Amino acid sequence: MSGQEETAWSASSKDSKKLPKSSEKLASEPSNQPDPDPIVQAEDLPVNQENLPYRESTIPPWRFAFLCVGLCLGLFMAMMDASIVATSLYTIGVEFNDLEHINWVALAYSLAFLGCSVFFASMSDVIGRRNAFVVAFVLFFAFSLGCGFAHNMATLIACRTFQGIGGAGLFSVTMITFPELTPKKLKGVIAPLLGMIISFGGILGPVLGGVFTKYASWRWVFWLNGPLGFVSMLLFYAAWPKAEHLPTLQQRSWRDLDFLGSFLVVAAAVLVTFAFQSAGTDVEANNPWISGLFIGPLVTGSICWVGLFLWQHVFERTWPRKMAAIPLGLFRNHIFAAAALHTVFLGFAYLAALYAIPLRLQVVNSKSPIMAGVMMLPMLGATGVGSVLTGILSSKTNRLFETMTFGAVLVTLGLALESTVSDSQVLEQKFLGFLVLLGLGIGMINSAATIFTTIEAPIPEHAPAQGIIAQSRMLGGSIGIAMSSAVLAGQQRAHLAGVVSLSDLQDLKEAEQRLTPAQLTAIRTAYNNAFTETMKVCAIVTGIGVLIALGTYRHGRVPLGDQRAQQVKAEIERRRAERELDVQGHRATRVVV
Protein backbone atom coordinates (compact mmCIF):
# COMPACT_ATOMS: atom_id res chain seq x y z
CA MET A 1 0.00 0.00 0.00
CA SER A 2 1.19 3.60 0.54
CA GLY A 3 4.90 3.76 1.15
CA GLN A 4 5.29 0.19 0.08
CA GLU A 5 8.38 -0.54 -1.99
CA GLU A 6 8.21 -2.17 -5.39
CA THR A 7 8.68 -5.90 -5.08
CA ALA A 8 10.98 -8.21 -6.98
CA TRP A 9 8.47 -11.04 -7.20
CA SER A 10 7.01 -11.69 -10.64
CA ALA A 11 4.29 -13.84 -12.12
CA SER A 12 4.80 -16.33 -14.88
CA SER A 13 2.62 -16.35 -17.96
CA LYS A 14 1.66 -19.90 -17.07
CA ASP A 15 0.06 -18.72 -13.81
CA SER A 16 -1.77 -15.97 -15.65
CA LYS A 17 -3.33 -18.46 -18.07
CA LYS A 18 -4.73 -20.47 -15.17
CA LEU A 19 -7.16 -17.71 -14.19
CA PRO A 20 -10.71 -19.11 -14.54
CA LYS A 21 -13.25 -17.67 -16.95
CA SER A 22 -15.54 -16.76 -14.08
CA SER A 23 -12.84 -14.50 -12.74
CA GLU A 24 -12.24 -12.82 -16.10
CA LYS A 25 -15.74 -11.38 -15.95
CA LEU A 26 -14.59 -9.18 -13.10
CA ALA A 27 -11.94 -7.50 -15.21
CA SER A 28 -11.98 -3.75 -14.89
CA GLU A 29 -9.90 -3.06 -18.03
CA PRO A 30 -9.57 -4.74 -21.45
CA SER A 31 -7.30 -7.76 -21.43
CA ASN A 32 -4.94 -6.24 -24.03
CA GLN A 33 -3.84 -3.44 -21.72
CA PRO A 34 -0.09 -3.29 -21.02
CA ASP A 35 1.17 -4.55 -17.71
CA PRO A 36 3.86 -2.02 -16.77
CA ASP A 37 4.22 -2.80 -13.09
CA PRO A 38 5.56 -5.87 -11.33
CA ILE A 39 3.09 -8.37 -9.89
CA VAL A 40 3.67 -10.00 -6.55
CA GLN A 41 3.29 -13.68 -5.89
CA ALA A 42 3.37 -15.24 -2.43
CA GLU A 43 4.30 -18.90 -2.11
CA ASP A 44 0.81 -19.91 -1.07
CA LEU A 45 -1.26 -17.29 -2.83
CA PRO A 46 -2.19 -16.54 -6.44
CA VAL A 47 -1.27 -13.60 -8.58
CA ASN A 48 -3.87 -11.33 -10.06
CA GLN A 49 -3.40 -9.47 -13.31
CA GLU A 50 -3.72 -5.70 -13.34
CA ASN A 51 -7.08 -6.00 -15.09
CA LEU A 52 -8.44 -8.39 -12.46
CA PRO A 53 -8.70 -6.42 -9.21
CA TYR A 54 -10.78 -8.86 -7.20
CA ARG A 55 -11.87 -12.48 -7.45
CA GLU A 56 -13.76 -14.68 -4.99
CA SER A 57 -12.89 -18.26 -4.10
CA THR A 58 -13.54 -21.01 -6.66
CA ILE A 59 -12.21 -23.88 -4.55
CA PRO A 60 -13.51 -27.35 -5.59
CA PRO A 61 -16.06 -28.79 -3.12
CA TRP A 62 -14.02 -31.91 -2.26
CA ARG A 63 -10.95 -29.82 -1.47
CA PHE A 64 -13.01 -27.41 0.60
CA ALA A 65 -14.46 -30.32 2.60
CA PHE A 66 -11.01 -31.55 3.66
CA LEU A 67 -9.82 -28.00 4.33
CA CYS A 68 -12.93 -27.43 6.41
CA VAL A 69 -12.11 -30.39 8.66
CA GLY A 70 -8.53 -29.21 9.13
CA LEU A 71 -9.58 -25.67 10.04
CA CYS A 72 -12.38 -26.84 12.33
CA LEU A 73 -10.03 -29.10 14.26
CA GLY A 74 -7.64 -26.19 14.76
CA LEU A 75 -10.45 -23.93 15.97
CA PHE A 76 -11.79 -26.68 18.24
CA MET A 77 -8.39 -27.22 19.87
CA ALA A 78 -7.90 -23.48 20.45
CA MET A 79 -11.27 -23.14 22.21
CA MET A 80 -11.03 -26.47 24.06
CA ASP A 81 -7.70 -25.60 25.68
CA ALA A 82 -9.19 -22.46 27.17
CA SER A 83 -11.29 -24.62 29.52
CA ILE A 84 -9.86 -28.15 29.47
CA VAL A 85 -7.61 -27.62 32.51
CA ALA A 86 -10.55 -26.60 34.73
CA THR A 87 -10.96 -30.16 36.06
CA SER A 88 -7.21 -30.90 36.21
CA LEU A 89 -5.78 -27.97 38.15
CA TYR A 90 -5.75 -29.53 41.61
CA THR A 91 -4.13 -32.75 40.36
CA ILE A 92 -1.41 -30.71 38.65
CA GLY A 93 -0.84 -28.60 41.76
CA VAL A 94 -0.49 -31.66 43.99
CA GLU A 95 2.03 -33.33 41.64
CA PHE A 96 4.20 -30.20 41.52
CA ASN A 97 3.58 -29.41 45.21
CA ASP A 98 2.57 -25.88 44.22
CA LEU A 99 -1.10 -25.06 44.78
CA GLU A 100 -0.35 -21.36 45.26
CA HIS A 101 0.34 -20.68 41.56
CA ILE A 102 -1.95 -23.29 40.03
CA ASN A 103 -4.47 -20.73 38.69
CA TRP A 104 -1.76 -19.36 36.41
CA VAL A 105 -1.95 -22.56 34.37
CA ALA A 106 -5.36 -21.34 33.21
CA LEU A 107 -4.65 -17.60 33.30
CA ALA A 108 -1.47 -17.80 31.21
CA TYR A 109 -3.36 -19.28 28.26
CA SER A 110 -6.30 -16.88 28.42
CA LEU A 111 -4.11 -13.77 28.77
CA ALA A 112 -1.86 -14.79 25.86
CA PHE A 113 -4.91 -15.66 23.75
CA LEU A 114 -6.49 -12.33 24.60
CA GLY A 115 -3.39 -10.30 23.87
CA CYS A 116 -2.42 -11.79 20.50
CA SER A 117 -5.72 -12.30 18.65
CA VAL A 118 -5.71 -8.95 16.85
CA PHE A 119 -1.99 -9.01 16.04
CA PHE A 120 -2.19 -12.50 14.51
CA ALA A 121 -5.09 -11.34 12.36
CA SER A 122 -3.06 -8.38 11.10
CA MET A 123 0.04 -10.52 10.57
CA SER A 124 -1.94 -12.84 8.29
CA ASP A 125 -2.33 -9.90 5.89
CA VAL A 126 1.46 -9.76 5.62
CA ILE A 127 2.59 -13.39 5.44
CA GLY A 128 -0.60 -14.89 4.00
CA ARG A 129 -3.36 -16.94 5.58
CA ARG A 130 -1.72 -20.32 5.04
CA ASN A 131 1.61 -19.28 6.50
CA ALA A 132 -0.07 -17.59 9.47
CA PHE A 133 -2.04 -20.76 10.23
CA VAL A 134 1.14 -22.85 10.04
CA VAL A 135 2.99 -20.49 12.41
CA ALA A 136 0.09 -20.62 14.87
CA PHE A 137 -0.11 -24.40 14.59
CA VAL A 138 3.61 -24.90 15.20
CA LEU A 139 3.45 -22.73 18.33
CA PHE A 140 0.33 -24.45 19.62
CA PHE A 141 1.49 -27.99 18.80
CA ALA A 142 5.04 -27.63 20.14
CA PHE A 143 4.08 -25.98 23.41
CA SER A 144 1.13 -28.34 23.95
CA LEU A 145 3.67 -31.15 23.99
CA GLY A 146 5.89 -28.99 26.19
CA CYS A 147 3.05 -28.64 28.69
CA GLY A 148 2.63 -32.40 28.78
CA PHE A 149 6.34 -32.99 29.43
CA ALA A 150 6.72 -30.16 31.99
CA HIS A 151 8.39 -31.17 35.27
CA ASN A 152 7.70 -28.03 37.31
CA MET A 153 5.10 -25.29 37.57
CA ALA A 154 7.26 -22.55 36.02
CA THR A 155 7.86 -24.59 32.87
CA LEU A 156 4.18 -25.47 32.59
CA ILE A 157 3.06 -21.85 32.91
CA ALA A 158 5.65 -20.69 30.36
CA CYS A 159 4.53 -23.36 27.88
CA ARG A 160 0.87 -22.47 28.46
CA THR A 161 1.68 -18.85 27.60
CA PHE A 162 3.16 -19.74 24.21
CA GLN A 163 0.40 -22.27 23.66
CA GLY A 164 -2.08 -19.43 24.18
CA ILE A 165 -0.31 -17.35 21.53
CA GLY A 166 -0.67 -20.25 19.10
CA GLY A 167 -4.30 -20.71 20.11
CA ALA A 168 -4.99 -17.04 19.36
CA GLY A 169 -3.55 -17.54 15.88
CA LEU A 170 -5.53 -20.71 15.22
CA PHE A 171 -8.73 -18.95 16.25
CA SER A 172 -8.17 -15.68 14.39
CA VAL A 173 -6.83 -17.15 11.15
CA THR A 174 -9.58 -19.76 11.00
CA MET A 175 -12.29 -17.14 11.51
CA ILE A 176 -10.73 -15.03 8.73
CA THR A 177 -9.97 -17.82 6.26
CA PHE A 178 -13.31 -19.61 6.37
CA PRO A 179 -15.46 -16.76 4.99
CA GLU A 180 -12.81 -15.98 2.35
CA LEU A 181 -12.44 -19.53 1.00
CA THR A 182 -16.02 -20.74 1.32
CA PRO A 183 -17.71 -21.19 -2.08
CA LYS A 184 -20.55 -18.78 -2.64
CA LYS A 185 -23.27 -21.42 -2.41
CA LEU A 186 -22.01 -22.59 1.00
CA LYS A 187 -21.54 -19.22 2.70
CA GLY A 188 -24.85 -19.58 4.53
CA VAL A 189 -23.71 -22.66 6.47
CA ILE A 190 -20.28 -21.48 7.58
CA ALA A 191 -21.33 -19.09 10.35
CA PRO A 192 -23.53 -21.72 12.08
CA LEU A 193 -20.69 -24.23 11.78
CA LEU A 194 -18.17 -21.84 13.33
CA GLY A 195 -20.62 -20.96 16.10
CA MET A 196 -21.02 -24.64 16.95
CA ILE A 197 -17.28 -25.31 16.98
CA ILE A 198 -16.62 -22.35 19.30
CA SER A 199 -19.31 -23.47 21.73
CA PHE A 200 -18.52 -27.19 21.52
CA GLY A 201 -14.84 -26.59 22.23
CA GLY A 202 -15.55 -24.57 25.35
CA ILE A 203 -18.18 -26.95 26.75
CA LEU A 204 -16.38 -30.22 25.97
CA GLY A 205 -13.08 -28.99 27.42
CA PRO A 206 -13.90 -29.69 31.09
CA VAL A 207 -15.48 -33.04 30.16
CA LEU A 208 -12.39 -34.30 28.33
CA GLY A 209 -10.12 -32.85 31.00
CA GLY A 210 -11.95 -34.79 33.69
CA VAL A 211 -11.87 -38.03 31.71
CA PHE A 212 -8.13 -37.90 31.01
CA THR A 213 -7.25 -36.80 34.53
CA LYS A 214 -9.24 -39.63 36.11
CA TYR A 215 -8.52 -42.52 33.75
CA ALA A 216 -5.08 -41.65 32.33
CA SER A 217 -2.98 -38.65 33.37
CA TRP A 218 -3.41 -34.89 33.41
CA ARG A 219 -0.56 -34.79 30.89
CA TRP A 220 -2.90 -36.27 28.26
CA VAL A 221 -4.95 -33.08 28.55
CA PHE A 222 -2.11 -31.51 26.55
CA TRP A 223 -0.85 -34.54 24.63
CA LEU A 224 -4.32 -34.91 23.12
CA ASN A 225 -3.40 -32.00 20.86
CA GLY A 226 -0.70 -34.17 19.29
CA PRO A 227 -2.89 -36.56 17.26
CA LEU A 228 -5.60 -33.95 16.75
CA GLY A 229 -3.05 -31.41 15.59
CA PHE A 230 -1.37 -33.87 13.22
CA VAL A 231 -4.69 -34.60 11.49
CA SER A 232 -5.57 -30.90 11.39
CA MET A 233 -2.26 -29.85 9.85
CA LEU A 234 -2.19 -32.75 7.38
CA LEU A 235 -5.67 -32.00 6.04
CA PHE A 236 -5.12 -28.24 6.02
CA TYR A 237 -1.84 -28.34 4.14
CA ALA A 238 -2.86 -31.06 1.70
CA ALA A 239 -6.19 -29.42 0.88
CA TRP A 240 -4.96 -25.84 0.54
CA PRO A 241 -6.30 -24.78 -2.87
CA LYS A 242 -4.24 -24.02 -5.93
CA ALA A 243 -3.50 -20.42 -6.76
CA GLU A 244 -6.16 -20.05 -9.42
CA HIS A 245 -8.92 -21.02 -6.97
CA LEU A 246 -8.03 -18.53 -4.24
CA PRO A 247 -9.69 -15.15 -3.75
CA THR A 248 -7.49 -12.15 -4.41
CA LEU A 249 -6.55 -10.07 -1.41
CA GLN A 250 -4.01 -7.30 -1.10
CA GLN A 251 -0.94 -8.36 0.81
CA ARG A 252 0.69 -5.85 3.11
CA SER A 253 4.33 -5.40 4.05
CA TRP A 254 5.71 -5.41 7.57
CA ARG A 255 6.15 -1.65 7.40
CA ASP A 256 2.38 -1.32 6.92
CA LEU A 257 1.70 -2.84 10.35
CA ASP A 258 0.90 -0.63 13.32
CA PHE A 259 3.36 -2.04 15.86
CA LEU A 260 2.75 0.62 18.52
CA GLY A 261 -1.00 0.10 18.21
CA SER A 262 -0.56 -3.67 18.45
CA PHE A 263 1.55 -3.25 21.59
CA LEU A 264 -1.08 -0.99 23.16
CA VAL A 265 -3.81 -3.53 22.33
CA VAL A 266 -1.87 -6.28 24.10
CA ALA A 267 -0.97 -4.09 27.09
CA ALA A 268 -4.46 -2.65 27.53
CA ALA A 269 -6.29 -5.97 27.25
CA VAL A 270 -3.87 -8.02 29.35
CA LEU A 271 -3.40 -5.48 32.16
CA VAL A 272 -7.12 -4.84 32.69
CA THR A 273 -7.91 -8.54 32.59
CA PHE A 274 -4.98 -9.37 34.87
CA ALA A 275 -6.26 -6.86 37.43
CA PHE A 276 -9.71 -8.45 37.63
CA GLN A 277 -8.37 -12.00 37.60
CA SER A 278 -5.85 -11.26 40.35
CA ALA A 279 -8.56 -9.79 42.56
CA GLY A 280 -10.99 -12.56 41.72
CA THR A 281 -8.63 -15.39 42.60
CA ASP A 282 -7.29 -13.88 45.85
CA VAL A 283 -9.23 -15.94 48.39
CA GLU A 284 -7.30 -14.82 51.47
CA ALA A 285 -7.52 -11.02 51.01
CA ASN A 286 -10.39 -9.35 52.87
CA ASN A 287 -10.84 -6.68 50.19
CA PRO A 288 -8.80 -7.47 47.06
CA TRP A 289 -10.41 -4.58 45.16
CA ILE A 290 -8.29 -1.99 46.98
CA SER A 291 -5.01 -3.85 46.72
CA GLY A 292 -2.15 -2.56 44.61
CA LEU A 293 -2.27 -5.75 42.55
CA PHE A 294 -5.73 -4.71 41.35
CA ILE A 295 -5.51 -0.91 41.17
CA GLY A 296 -2.06 -0.71 39.55
CA PRO A 297 -2.73 -2.90 36.49
CA LEU A 298 -6.27 -1.52 36.14
CA VAL A 299 -5.14 2.12 36.02
CA THR A 300 -2.20 1.34 33.73
CA GLY A 301 -4.40 -0.74 31.44
CA SER A 302 -7.05 1.98 31.29
CA ILE A 303 -4.40 4.53 30.31
CA CYS A 304 -3.27 2.15 27.57
CA TRP A 305 -6.86 1.92 26.26
CA VAL A 306 -7.11 5.71 26.06
CA GLY A 307 -3.68 5.91 24.46
CA LEU A 308 -4.64 3.21 21.97
CA PHE A 309 -7.64 5.05 20.58
CA LEU A 310 -5.80 8.37 20.49
CA TRP A 311 -2.93 6.72 18.63
CA GLN A 312 -5.29 5.02 16.19
CA HIS A 313 -6.81 8.40 15.36
CA VAL A 314 -3.36 9.88 14.71
CA PHE A 315 -2.20 6.80 12.79
CA GLU A 316 -5.16 6.76 10.40
CA ARG A 317 -4.87 10.49 9.68
CA THR A 318 -1.11 10.34 9.14
CA TRP A 319 -0.89 7.05 7.20
CA PRO A 320 -4.38 6.51 5.75
CA ARG A 321 -3.31 3.62 3.49
CA LYS A 322 -1.52 1.63 6.16
CA MET A 323 -3.13 -0.92 8.44
CA ALA A 324 -4.17 0.30 11.88
CA ALA A 325 -4.22 -2.27 14.68
CA ILE A 326 -7.83 -1.33 15.48
CA PRO A 327 -9.39 0.34 12.40
CA LEU A 328 -11.63 3.04 13.86
CA GLY A 329 -13.72 3.00 10.69
CA LEU A 330 -15.15 -0.34 11.81
CA PHE A 331 -16.65 1.31 14.88
CA ARG A 332 -18.20 4.08 12.82
CA ASN A 333 -20.48 1.32 11.54
CA HIS A 334 -22.97 1.15 14.39
CA ILE A 335 -23.90 -2.45 13.54
CA PHE A 336 -20.35 -3.76 13.84
CA ALA A 337 -19.76 -1.65 16.95
CA ALA A 338 -22.89 -3.04 18.59
CA ALA A 339 -22.00 -6.62 17.61
CA ALA A 340 -18.47 -6.26 19.03
CA LEU A 341 -19.69 -4.71 22.28
CA HIS A 342 -22.39 -7.35 22.59
CA THR A 343 -19.71 -10.03 22.17
CA VAL A 344 -17.92 -8.64 25.24
CA PHE A 345 -21.09 -8.92 27.32
CA LEU A 346 -21.96 -12.39 26.04
CA GLY A 347 -18.39 -13.59 26.58
CA PHE A 348 -18.63 -12.35 30.18
CA ALA A 349 -21.70 -14.47 30.89
CA TYR A 350 -20.75 -17.46 28.75
CA LEU A 351 -17.34 -18.20 30.26
CA ALA A 352 -18.47 -17.32 33.78
CA ALA A 353 -21.31 -19.82 33.45
CA LEU A 354 -19.03 -22.38 31.83
CA TYR A 355 -16.86 -22.42 34.94
CA ALA A 356 -19.59 -21.89 37.57
CA ILE A 357 -22.07 -24.56 36.43
CA PRO A 358 -19.77 -27.63 36.60
CA LEU A 359 -18.38 -26.39 39.93
CA ARG A 360 -21.87 -26.14 41.39
CA LEU A 361 -22.79 -29.61 40.15
CA GLN A 362 -19.69 -31.07 41.79
CA VAL A 363 -19.87 -29.30 45.15
CA VAL A 364 -23.57 -28.71 45.79
CA ASN A 365 -24.95 -31.79 44.02
CA SER A 366 -21.99 -34.14 44.69
CA LYS A 367 -21.46 -35.04 41.03
CA SER A 368 -18.13 -36.33 39.77
CA PRO A 369 -16.18 -34.10 37.37
CA ILE A 370 -17.08 -36.43 34.51
CA MET A 371 -20.79 -36.49 35.39
CA ALA A 372 -20.78 -32.70 35.81
CA GLY A 373 -19.42 -32.46 32.28
CA VAL A 374 -21.99 -34.92 30.95
CA MET A 375 -24.77 -32.80 32.43
CA MET A 376 -23.55 -29.93 30.25
CA LEU A 377 -24.55 -31.89 27.15
CA PRO A 378 -28.10 -30.43 26.97
CA MET A 379 -26.48 -27.01 26.73
CA LEU A 380 -24.09 -28.35 24.10
CA GLY A 381 -26.89 -29.78 21.97
CA ALA A 382 -28.97 -26.63 22.27
CA THR A 383 -25.99 -24.55 21.18
CA GLY A 384 -25.77 -26.57 17.97
CA VAL A 385 -29.48 -26.12 17.33
CA GLY A 386 -29.21 -22.37 17.91
CA SER A 387 -26.29 -22.08 15.49
CA VAL A 388 -28.14 -23.95 12.74
CA LEU A 389 -31.32 -22.00 13.39
CA THR A 390 -29.50 -18.73 12.79
CA GLY A 391 -28.37 -19.90 9.36
CA ILE A 392 -31.86 -21.07 8.43
CA LEU A 393 -33.58 -17.87 9.53
CA SER A 394 -31.23 -15.67 7.48
CA SER A 395 -30.87 -17.96 4.45
CA LYS A 396 -33.14 -15.77 2.30
CA THR A 397 -33.86 -12.67 4.36
CA ASN A 398 -31.49 -10.84 6.69
CA ARG A 399 -32.89 -11.59 10.15
CA LEU A 400 -29.65 -11.22 12.08
CA PHE A 401 -31.03 -8.38 14.20
CA GLU A 402 -33.95 -10.50 15.35
CA THR A 403 -31.68 -13.52 15.88
CA MET A 404 -29.13 -11.71 18.03
CA THR A 405 -31.77 -9.88 20.07
CA PHE A 406 -33.89 -12.98 20.70
CA GLY A 407 -30.76 -15.00 21.50
CA ALA A 408 -29.76 -12.40 24.09
CA VAL A 409 -33.23 -12.62 25.63
CA LEU A 410 -32.96 -16.43 25.85
CA VAL A 411 -29.53 -16.23 27.50
CA THR A 412 -30.78 -13.65 30.01
CA LEU A 413 -33.84 -15.76 30.78
CA GLY A 414 -31.80 -18.95 31.18
CA LEU A 415 -29.31 -17.30 33.54
CA ALA A 416 -32.04 -15.65 35.62
CA LEU A 417 -33.91 -18.95 35.97
CA GLU A 418 -30.72 -20.79 36.98
CA SER A 419 -30.42 -18.40 39.92
CA THR A 420 -33.74 -19.73 41.29
CA VAL A 421 -32.55 -23.34 41.70
CA SER A 422 -32.55 -24.46 45.34
CA ASP A 423 -29.51 -25.57 47.31
CA SER A 424 -30.82 -29.12 47.63
CA GLN A 425 -28.19 -31.82 47.21
CA VAL A 426 -30.63 -33.59 44.87
CA LEU A 427 -30.43 -31.84 41.52
CA GLU A 428 -33.71 -30.37 40.31
CA GLN A 429 -34.57 -31.40 36.76
CA LYS A 430 -35.42 -27.84 35.79
CA PHE A 431 -31.72 -27.03 36.16
CA LEU A 432 -30.99 -28.97 32.96
CA GLY A 433 -33.97 -27.41 31.20
CA PHE A 434 -32.67 -23.93 31.90
CA LEU A 435 -29.33 -24.98 30.40
CA VAL A 436 -31.17 -25.64 27.13
CA LEU A 437 -32.41 -22.03 27.03
CA LEU A 438 -28.90 -20.82 27.76
CA GLY A 439 -27.30 -22.98 25.07
CA LEU A 440 -29.91 -22.10 22.44
CA GLY A 441 -29.33 -18.38 22.94
CA ILE A 442 -25.54 -18.72 22.92
CA GLY A 443 -25.62 -20.66 19.66
CA MET A 444 -27.82 -18.05 17.99
CA ILE A 445 -25.66 -15.15 19.15
CA ASN A 446 -22.31 -16.72 18.23
CA SER A 447 -23.48 -17.43 14.69
CA ALA A 448 -25.08 -14.02 14.26
CA ALA A 449 -21.91 -12.27 15.47
CA THR A 450 -19.80 -14.25 12.98
CA ILE A 451 -22.09 -13.28 10.09
CA PHE A 452 -22.25 -9.64 11.19
CA THR A 453 -18.46 -9.45 11.20
CA THR A 454 -18.23 -10.91 7.71
CA ILE A 455 -20.84 -8.72 6.04
CA GLU A 456 -20.35 -5.44 7.91
CA ALA A 457 -16.56 -5.15 7.73
CA PRO A 458 -15.11 -4.01 4.37
CA ILE A 459 -13.13 -6.76 2.65
CA PRO A 460 -9.70 -5.20 3.41
CA GLU A 461 -10.62 -5.07 7.11
CA HIS A 462 -11.96 -8.61 7.50
CA ALA A 463 -8.80 -9.75 9.29
CA PRO A 464 -8.70 -7.08 12.02
CA ALA A 465 -12.49 -7.30 12.37
CA GLN A 466 -12.33 -11.01 13.19
CA GLY A 467 -9.42 -10.36 15.55
CA ILE A 468 -11.46 -7.71 17.36
CA ILE A 469 -14.40 -10.09 17.80
CA ALA A 470 -12.09 -12.83 19.10
CA GLN A 471 -10.46 -10.43 21.53
CA SER A 472 -13.83 -9.04 22.63
CA ARG A 473 -15.12 -12.51 23.47
CA MET A 474 -12.04 -13.43 25.50
CA LEU A 475 -11.88 -10.01 27.20
CA GLY A 476 -15.45 -10.30 28.42
CA GLY A 477 -14.99 -13.96 29.34
CA SER A 478 -11.84 -13.35 31.36
CA ILE A 479 -13.52 -10.60 33.36
CA GLY A 480 -16.57 -12.85 33.80
CA ILE A 481 -14.45 -15.66 35.21
CA ALA A 482 -12.74 -13.18 37.53
CA MET A 483 -16.15 -11.94 38.72
CA SER A 484 -17.29 -15.50 39.38
CA SER A 485 -14.10 -16.25 41.31
CA ALA A 486 -14.46 -13.04 43.33
CA VAL A 487 -18.05 -13.87 44.26
CA LEU A 488 -17.00 -17.36 45.36
CA ALA A 489 -14.08 -15.98 47.37
CA GLY A 490 -16.43 -13.55 49.12
CA GLN A 491 -18.82 -16.36 50.04
CA GLN A 492 -15.94 -18.48 51.31
CA ARG A 493 -14.73 -15.65 53.53
CA ALA A 494 -18.25 -14.96 54.80
CA HIS A 495 -19.40 -18.52 55.52
CA LEU A 496 -16.33 -20.73 55.75
CA ALA A 497 -13.69 -18.67 57.58
CA GLY A 498 -12.77 -20.65 60.68
CA VAL A 499 -15.04 -23.51 59.61
CA VAL A 500 -13.06 -25.18 56.82
CA SER A 501 -9.36 -24.88 55.99
CA LEU A 502 -8.12 -23.63 52.62
CA SER A 503 -6.50 -27.00 51.87
CA ASP A 504 -9.85 -28.75 52.38
CA LEU A 505 -11.51 -26.33 49.93
CA GLN A 506 -8.88 -27.12 47.31
CA ASP A 507 -9.75 -30.83 47.38
CA LEU A 508 -13.32 -31.23 48.56
CA LYS A 509 -13.67 -34.81 47.31
CA GLU A 510 -10.95 -36.08 49.62
CA ALA A 511 -11.96 -33.71 52.43
CA GLU A 512 -15.53 -35.07 52.47
CA GLN A 513 -14.30 -38.16 54.30
CA ARG A 514 -13.11 -36.17 57.32
CA LEU A 515 -15.48 -33.19 57.39
CA THR A 516 -18.53 -33.13 59.64
CA PRO A 517 -22.09 -32.87 58.24
CA ALA A 518 -22.25 -29.29 59.52
CA GLN A 519 -19.07 -28.37 57.66
CA LEU A 520 -20.33 -29.98 54.46
CA THR A 521 -23.61 -28.10 54.75
CA ALA A 522 -21.73 -24.82 55.20
CA ILE A 523 -19.65 -25.56 52.11
CA ARG A 524 -22.70 -26.36 49.98
CA THR A 525 -24.45 -23.23 51.20
CA ALA A 526 -21.47 -21.03 50.34
CA TYR A 527 -21.03 -22.52 46.89
CA ASN A 528 -24.74 -22.41 46.12
CA ASN A 529 -24.93 -18.76 47.21
CA ALA A 530 -21.93 -17.98 45.02
CA PHE A 531 -23.56 -19.72 42.06
CA THR A 532 -26.83 -17.85 42.59
CA GLU A 533 -25.09 -14.48 42.81
CA THR A 534 -22.98 -15.28 39.74
CA MET A 535 -26.06 -16.16 37.69
CA LYS A 536 -27.78 -12.94 38.80
CA VAL A 537 -24.80 -10.81 37.82
CA CYS A 538 -24.55 -12.60 34.47
CA ALA A 539 -28.28 -12.10 33.87
CA ILE A 540 -27.90 -8.37 34.52
CA VAL A 541 -24.93 -8.19 32.15
CA THR A 542 -26.75 -10.03 29.35
CA GLY A 543 -29.86 -7.93 30.04
CA ILE A 544 -27.74 -4.91 29.15
CA GLY A 545 -26.61 -6.98 26.17
CA VAL A 546 -30.22 -7.15 24.97
CA LEU A 547 -30.27 -3.35 24.77
CA ILE A 548 -26.94 -3.36 22.94
CA ALA A 549 -28.27 -5.94 20.47
CA LEU A 550 -30.95 -3.44 19.47
CA GLY A 551 -28.13 -1.40 17.95
CA THR A 552 -27.67 -4.02 15.22
CA TYR A 553 -30.89 -2.96 13.51
CA ARG A 554 -30.51 -1.62 9.97
CA HIS A 555 -33.10 0.19 7.89
CA GLY A 556 -33.54 -1.14 4.37
CA ARG A 557 -31.98 -4.55 4.94
CA VAL A 558 -31.15 -6.67 1.92
CA PRO A 559 -30.49 -10.44 1.67
CA LEU A 560 -27.04 -11.49 2.87
CA GLY A 561 -26.03 -12.56 -0.64
CA ASP A 562 -26.87 -9.12 -2.01
CA GLN A 563 -24.95 -7.42 0.79
CA ARG A 564 -21.94 -9.60 0.03
CA ALA A 565 -22.20 -8.61 -3.65
CA GLN A 566 -22.20 -4.96 -2.60
CA GLN A 567 -19.02 -5.60 -0.61
CA VAL A 568 -17.32 -7.11 -3.65
CA LYS A 569 -18.41 -4.21 -5.84
CA ALA A 570 -17.12 -1.69 -3.31
CA GLU A 571 -13.78 -3.52 -3.11
CA ILE A 572 -13.42 -3.55 -6.91
CA GLU A 573 -14.09 0.19 -7.03
CA ARG A 574 -11.69 0.85 -4.16
CA ARG A 575 -8.89 -1.07 -5.87
CA ARG A 576 -9.54 0.67 -9.17
CA ALA A 577 -9.28 4.08 -7.51
CA GLU A 578 -6.21 3.02 -5.57
CA ARG A 579 -4.62 1.65 -8.72
CA GLU A 580 -5.11 4.97 -10.46
CA LEU A 581 -3.35 6.74 -7.60
CA ASP A 582 -0.48 4.26 -7.77
CA VAL A 583 -0.07 4.73 -11.51
CA GLN A 584 -0.12 8.49 -11.11
CA GLY A 585 2.51 8.25 -8.40
CA HIS A 586 4.55 5.67 -10.37
CA ARG A 587 4.14 3.10 -7.60
CA ALA A 588 3.41 -0.62 -7.92
CA THR A 589 0.83 -2.22 -5.66
CA ARG A 590 1.18 -5.85 -4.75
CA VAL A 591 -2.05 -7.75 -5.39
CA VAL A 592 -2.05 -11.21 -3.88
CA VAL A 593 -4.04 -13.42 -1.55
Image (spheres, rainbow, N blue to C red):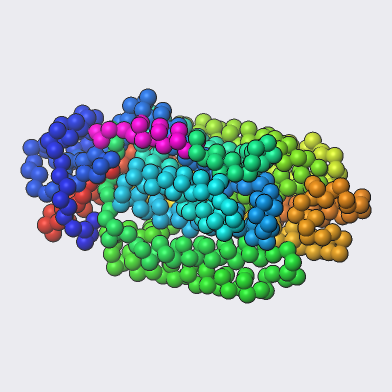
The quarter holding residue 561 reads: top left
- Residue 167 relative to residue 82: left or right: left
Res. 36 visible in picture: yes
Instruction: Work out which quarter of the rendered image holds the N terminus and state it.
Output: bottom left
The foreground one among 373 and 125 is 373
Q: Report the span colored magenta.
A: 228-244
Question: Looking at the image, which residue is at 40% across and 39% down?
Answer: 179
The foreground one among 274 and 394 is 274
Instruction: Work out which quarter of the rendered image holds the C terminus and state it.
Output: top left
Give the answer, above or below, for where 293 lies relative to 57: below
**Residue 250 horizontal/vertical position (percent):** 27, 48
**Residue 288 horizontal/vertical position (percent):** 69, 69
- As for residue 231 lying within the magenta part, the answer is yes
Give the answer, above or below, for where 297 lies relative to 2: below
**Residue 202 horizontal/vertical position (percent):** 59, 43
Question: Looking at the image, which residue is at 17% across and 35% down?
Answer: 15
Secondary structure mostly seen in the magenta stretch = helix
Question: Looking at the image, which residue is at 33% across and 38% down?
Answer: 565
